[in-house]
Image: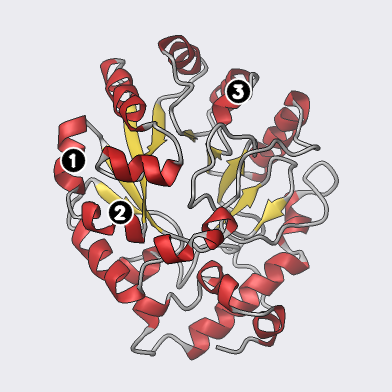
């Protein structure tokens, strides 16, 4: 057994709903329809109380599309009252000036909007809808209100060339910061590998170039490859995890594994030590011992299991064969 470094995660991403008003090609969670056992308002507040007592340092609110929850302001106000830092991810389509004001009154100070291309054609292709002009408008709207505006940019085959234009594009549209993610071949993205999957060497080259800009940072599991990290290897199941809309835990946003029980049934200490998390830690431990000196580790993304999931059988994962 590979013991966890911590008794509980430091950081949590919370998929507050799986319901979404878009069907983006790269969506790692295949968002669209609300889960039948999505946590109610009171259940969400109960889980927040537990996470606060455990000592979670911060929470990222994601989806689906969080703004589809009519109780979102009540949830954010509770986090604000507890002085528990949070950041809100949204596709921006429902962010009217009125909704923006109510979210601000609930304590929202930072927004992260999905941006999947520097051109209208590319962004709309990935999103499957004509949303580019709306996103640019929302960024300006948030900036006018004095709020911190970040964008999320997933590096894919279809937007790889445009990625090199991102620093100048950020200046033109007024972004404060940009979080770049590599494409993960999971969820709906696994149905579009030929259009979205980027070869490792090309991905590595563009990330190295973009990280020269101090306003651009890397999200996901590859931070340790490109810069210093609190721990060796991937932070998933070591420092962070995801809470699903039903209150279950996943070791990583991009992995399909989740605990059988939810945080309504067991505390986070128990779920953090479950077999699902143990499977991921064993993979990480194996890769850290066997792959650390490999010349291909930077482009193979060795200990990030989510990158390899579509290409491995369950037997290969459990058998820890590279």
Q: CA distance from mark 2 to mark 1?
A: 13 Å
Residue at 35% across, 45% down: 116
For mark 3, give the secondary structure. Answer: helix
Q: Residue furthest top?
A: 98
Residue 243 coordinates in the image, percent (x, y)? 66, 46
- The answer to whether residue 127 is seen in the rendering is yes
Q: Residues within 10 Å of mark 1 (few under 14, many from 20)?
A: some
Q: Nearer the viewer, residue 63 or 185?
A: 185
In the drawing, what numbered circle is on residue 159? 2
Colouring chosen for the image of the structure: secondary structure
* Quadrant holding the N terminus: bottom right
Which residue corresponds to the image point at 60% horizontal and 49% vertical from the top-left?
A: 30
Which residue is located at x 60 percent, y 25 percent?
A: 68
Q: Which residue is mark 3?
A: 72
Q: Nearer the viewer, mark 2 or mark 1?
A: 2
Q: Which mark is in front, 3 or 2?
A: 2
Quick one: 180 or 60, which is closer to the camera? 180
Q: Say whether residue 314 is left or right of residue 104.
A: right
Decide which of tag 1 and tag 3 comes sooner along the chain: 3
Q: Are marks 2 and 1 in contact (CB under 8 Å)?
A: no
Is 121 positioned to the left or the right of 74 in the image? left
Q: Secondary structure at mark 1?
A: helix
Residue 82 at least partly seen: no
Which numbered dot is residue 57?
none
Q: Which mark is residue 169?
A: 1
Q: What is the C-alpha distance between the residues marked 3 and 2?
A: 32 Å
Q: Is residue 140 left or right of residue 112?
A: left
């Amino acid at each position: 057994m590979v013991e966890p470094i911590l008794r509980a995660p430091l950081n949590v991403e919370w998929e507050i709903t799986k319901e979404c008003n878009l069907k983006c090609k790269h969506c790692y969670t295949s968002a669209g329809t609300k889960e039948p056992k999505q946590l109610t308002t009171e259940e969400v507040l109960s889980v927040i109380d537990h996470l606060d007592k455990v000592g979670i340092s911060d929470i990222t609110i994601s989806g689906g599309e969080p703004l589809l929850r009519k109780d979102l302001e009540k949830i954010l106000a509770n986090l604000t009252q507890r002085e528990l830092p949070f950041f809100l991810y949204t596709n921006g389509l429902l962010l009217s000036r009125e909704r923006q004001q109510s979210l601000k009154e609930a304590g929202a100070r930072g927004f992260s909007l999905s941006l999947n291309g520097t051109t209208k054609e590319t962004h709309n292709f990935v999103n499957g809808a004509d949303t580019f002009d709306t996103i640019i408008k929302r960024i300006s709207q948030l900036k006018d209100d004095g709020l911190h505006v970040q964008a999320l940019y997933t590096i894919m085959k279809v937007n790889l060339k445009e990625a090199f234009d991102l620093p100048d594009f950020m200046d033109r549209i007024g972004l404060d910061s940009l979080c770049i993610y590599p494409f993960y071949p999971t969820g709906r993205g696994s149905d579009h590998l030929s259009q979205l999957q980027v070869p490792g060497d090309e991905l590595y080259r563009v990330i190295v170039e973009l990280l020269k800009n101090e306003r651009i940072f890397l999200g996901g599991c590859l931070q340790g490859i490109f810069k210093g990290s609190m721990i060796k290897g991937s932070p998933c199941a070591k420092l962070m995890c995801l809470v699903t809309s039903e209150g279950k835990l996943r070791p990583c946003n991009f992995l399909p594994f989740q605990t059988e029980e939810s945080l309504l049934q067991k505390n986070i200490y128990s779920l953090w030590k479950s077999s699902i998390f143990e499977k991921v830690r064993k993979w990480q431990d194996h890769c850290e011992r066997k792959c650390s000196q490999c010349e291909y580790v930077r482009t193979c993304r060795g200990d990030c299991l989510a990158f390899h999931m579509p290409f491995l059988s369950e037997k290969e994962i459990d058998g820890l064969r590279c």
